[in-house]
Image: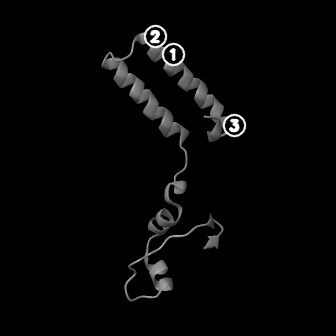
Amino acid sequence: MSSSFGPFAHFFSSIGERSFRRFLLDVSFDYLMGKFLGVALHQFDIDASLKFMRDFVRKRRIATEIDARTAREVWNSLRLRKSWDRCGARTF
């Protein structure tokens, strides 16, 4: 199938007695796009990624798995990465 989302395909082995068109009308948009696009459906989220990394560093520091100097270096590099997002997620 080709659409404004681009080309995609999926085999639906059990749609019951209904027509394929009725099946498409009955399923949710999120379900259908998840089947058609898989992981390509997910978009990079710089804010969520940076939050996850800051939390990770914080937990490692509390657990004394990394020292203060290393934690500070990582923290500072995360701040720099945030400013790079103006160029797009690919630069991250």
Looking at the rendered structure, the kind of residue marked 3 is Cys
Q: Quadrant of the N terminus?
A: bottom right
Q: Residue at x 50, y 33 (%)?
A: 50
Does the CB distance between marks 2 and 1 fall below 8 Å? Answer: yes
Q: Which residue is mark 1?
A: 73
How packed is label 2: few (under 14 Cα within 10 Å), some, or many (20 or more)?
few
**Residue 53 sits in which quadrant?**
top left
Residue 28 point in image, percent of width and height: 44, 70
Q: Residue furthest right?
A: 87
- For mark 3, give the secondary structure: helix
Q: Quadrant of the C terminus?
A: top right
- Image disc number at residue 40: none
**Residue 80 sits in which quadrant?**
top right
Looking at the rendered structure, the kind of residue marked 2 is Arg
Q: CA distance from mark 3 to mark 2?
A: 29 Å
Residue 42 versus residue 25 in the image, above or below = above
Q: Residue at x 47, y 73 (%)?
A: 11
Q: Closest to the observer: 38 or 63?
A: 38
Q: CA distance from mark 3 to mark 1?
A: 22 Å
Q: Which residue is mark 3?
A: 87
Q: CA distance from mark 2 to mark 1?
A: 6 Å
Q: How is the image coloured?
A: one colour
Residue 40 point in image, percent of width and height: 54, 55
Q: Is residue 4 left or right of residue 45?
A: right
Q: Closest to the observer: 31 or 8?
A: 8
Does the CB distance between marks 3 and 2 fall below 8 Å? Answer: no
Q: Residue at x 46, y 33 (%)?
A: 51
Q: Which residue is mark 2?
A: 69
